[in-house]
Image: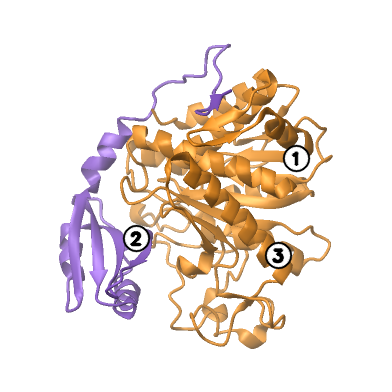
Chain colours: A purple, B orange
Amino acid sequence: MSSTSQPVLRVRITARDTETLRALLREARPDIGGGPHRADDGTCSIEAYVTGEQAEALEREGVSVTTIENATAAGLARQAEVGEGDRFAPADAVPHGLAVKA
Amino acid sequence: MYLNITEVESGVTSLATAFPATSELIDLPEPSVEGRAAHALRIGAAPAGTNDCAVLIGGVHAREWGSCEVLINFAADLLEAHDTGTGLVYGGTSFTRAQVRKILDELEIVVFPLVNPDGRLYSQTVEDLWRKNRNPAQSGGDPKRIGVDINRNYDFLFDFRTAFHPDADVRVSDDPGDLVYQGPSPFSEPETRNVRWLLETYPRARWLVDVHSYSEDMLTVWGDDENQSAHPNQNFLNPDFDHQRGLPGDAYGEYLPKFDADDSIVLAERFCTAVQGVRGRPYTPMSAFHLYPTCGTSDDYAYSRHRVDETKGKILGFTIEWGDRFGGFHPPWQEMSDIILDVDAGLVQFCLTALA
């Protein structure tokens, strides 16, 4: 269940119970992110990465799908945060780690 | 900024050059599918093989970018602090100079930060949500069917159709078009074989930690079913339980001796406590099955080796799932920097707990 021709959305799938979510994931096999979260009211949710069309297809009785963000746009923004060249090419350049050394 | 694949490699190389007394560059034997060389870093003040060894791997799933940075920064923190005689401070979690010295003096650490360079390059430059490697062998020429999920390519219960109950929602597939495609056979991928080589080459390996994202968990074995310590005959080697594994709450549970279960959960709990101390993020220690049923993963492979072949040493396997719903697989770099501090504090504590 993947497509690169349409924007990919990060969505939250919320089912009325664990078994409903399991059945949906077994049938549709969406690209999921993270693990399932069970709420106090018995509902169970998980994040998925799907096209708008696929998101609509996931909607059914006992299941709601809400869009979190346009994952394609977010991905492009993240790709702009990847280094270019080689920051460690100079002879004295070395990773220092983020912890404070004290 | 996130590291590109050249920078991950040069970061490892430059650390080995800068700290020759406490680190050593490891050439992995196999290039990636697209021909890229891979390197790891051995950390420790004692000669190789003197101390028990923790093997830390990352960059397995292409889109989980920050895993490489977690490991590069972890190595850099330890090496620099040991060299300059300081402790390490990660927000509200800190470690003394003596603790840093203890880790470098009494433990061997092998850091392999980028198992899947081809996938990371593709994710960082083309399709950011790419997960697998870039092996086209089983694709039939269809670009959507390229790649194998490295973390389903190990030999633990690889024949999932036989091992698992038909209703088990085991997250694996034998369809090359699927995101969790296991590959045509166990260890079919050079990236997977490189990890196996590390465990074979460092026979004092006692712990494997595989860094992934996201759900803020520290996972212990097993991934195929719930753990139990009462019925040794219920185990992955016993064909009497084929077609029964993978269901929660039923009669079958995967056998894990109590002393290993206890050791695993203590290591996972201490990791989570150190993470939470940094800025309050509540990571959860639990067995991998409670995320979802799996097979062919690195942590279960690492632990299962000594059960399959008694000549091999026992390795406790772990999987970190860093990050939460805020940023998904690759959060904005500012958030990722905070996550690196969280996880690296947890890893330092993991090493200290392993030595205790």
Considering the numbered disc 2 on the image, is that residue within a helix, a strand or a loop? strand
Mark 3 and mark 1 on one chain = yes
Considering the numbered disc 3 on the image, is that residue within a helix, a strand or a loop? helix
B171 left or right, relative to A5? right
Give the quarter of the image for residue B50.
top right
> Can the viewer see residue B43?
no
Q: Residues within 10 Å of mark 2 (few under 14, many from 20)?
A: some
B332 or A25, which lies in front? B332
Residue occupying image coordinates x 74% and y 45%: B53
Q: CA distance from mark 2 to mark 3?
A: 31 Å
Q: Residues within 10 Å of mark 3 (few under 14, many from 20)?
A: some
Q: Which residue is mark 2?
A: A32
**Amino acid identity at mark 3:** Asp
B219 left or right, relative to A57? right
Q: CA distance from mark 1 to mark 2?
A: 37 Å
Q: Which residue is mark 1?
A: B107
**Amino acid identity at mark 2:** Ile
Residue occupying image coordinates x 44% and y 44%: B119
> Can the viewer see residue B157?
yes
Which is in the foreground here, disc 2 or disc 3? 3
Q: Are marks 1 and 2 in contact (CB under 8 Å)?
A: no
Mark 2 and mark 3 on one chain = no
**Amino acid identity at mark 1:** Leu
Q: Which residue is mark 3?
A: B260
B326 left or right, relative to B242? left
Image coords of residue A80 (percent x, y): 30, 30
Q: CA distance from mark 3 to mark 1?
A: 20 Å
Residue occupying image coordinates x 63% and y 47%: B350
